[in-house]
Image (tube, grey):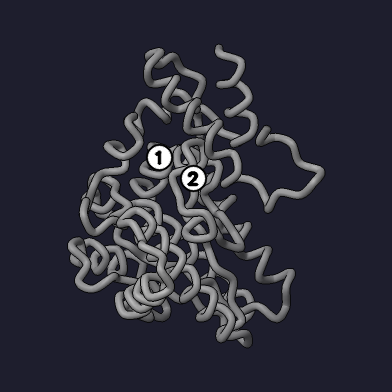
Amino acid sequence: MRSLQAEIMEFLKVQPIIDPQEEIERSIQLMMDYLSYHSGLTSLVLGISGGQDSTLVGKLAQMAIDRLRQAHPAINYRFIAVRLPYGDQLDQADAQAALDYIKADQVITVNIKSSTDKTVQSLQEAGQEISDFNKGNIKARMRMIIQYAIAGQNQGVVLGTDHAAESVTGFFTKYGDGAADLMPIWRLTKSQGRQLLAYLDCPPALYKKIPTADLEDQRPMQSDEEALGVSYDEIDQYLMGQAVSESAARVIENWYLKTKHKRHLPITVFDDFWK
């Protein structure tokens, strides 16, 4: 095994073989324990896009809240699912199907188009031209601002959907979808997430759809794999210690090395990993 591959597997805590029921329980217990330990917290907040990852975390969050309510009926525990479209979302039907499957206690919809566009306009008026790629990151950060605002008003914590295949490639926006209080599925690969959803009787269309971040106006619905230059199957094989082509390994390792800053707290004078 390549030495860097072993380092990555150890860092991300990936297990080549999982028991779906056991991993479901681990994720649910994390959320239950966190809310129970912090007595002032009563809600879990998550943005729902209609993709595999938010569908999985949303379902696990609702299961955690259901159990907490059963154990502590006097406490108003809630799961708040947040829809955050930019204008008209192209895969709105998928997002609605995910909500139907999750059956969240509460759904809040906030369209981020006006706030995002006004932010871009303000920057342009200040002499800063904003690229389409940069605007995509602004969208992701605007979504996280909204989720934290909702959590702040509802004694909540924000959930993230980052998993091992996204973490190794840094395929998330720093301080956008990469910002959260809890990451319930962080250790899992993309295929393992599908295993959990299949175990939870999720409609296959929700976890078999082509993954896309859909952040750029000029490249709507561009697939994650096209953006990364490597498939999720290859990433998963790599993360589970299996052999992949030299070209795939090189792409994965290059992403890992150049996105280390995304997996690190803000850099201080005591840090030198980036040099």
Residue 79 placement, left or right of 245: right
Who's the residue at 30% across and 37% down the image? Answer: 225
Who's the residue at 70% across and 81% down the image? Answer: 40
Residue 269 placement, left or right of 7: right
Q: Earlier in the sequence, mark 1 or mark 2?
A: 2
- The answer to whether residue 62 is visible is no
Query: Vertical placement of 11 versus 91: above or below?
Result: above
Q: Position of residue 131 (x, y in %)?
A: 33, 56
Q: Position of residue 263 (x, y in %)?
A: 60, 45
Q: Which residue is mark 1?
A: 190
Q: Position of residue 142 (x, y in %)?
A: 43, 70
Q: Position of residue 243 (x, y in %)?
A: 44, 14
Who's the residue at 20% across and 71% down the image? Answer: 88
Viewer-nearest residue: 275 or 140 = 275
- The answer to whether residue 259 is visible is yes
Q: Residue 2 lies in what quarter of the image?
A: top right
Q: Residue 193 lies in what quarter of the image?
A: top left
Q: Which label number is shown at residue 65?
A: none
Question: The disc labelled 2 sits on which kind of residue?
Answer: His
Quadrant showing the C terminus: top right
Who's the residue at 33% across and 62% down the image? Answer: 49
Quadrant showing the N terminus: top right
Separation of marks 1 and 2 at Cα, in angstroms: 7 Å
Viewer-nearest residue: 217 or 66 = 217
Callouts 1 and 2 close, C-beta under 8 Å = yes
Q: Which residue is mark 2?
A: 163
Give neighbour class at mark 2: few <14, some 14-19, many 20+ (Cα, 10 Å). many
Give neighbour class at mark 1: few <14, some 14-19, many 20+ (Cα, 10 Å). many
Kind of element beneath mark 2: loop
| Residue that sits furthest to the right in the current view | 270
Q: Residue 126 lies in what quarter of the image?
A: bottom left
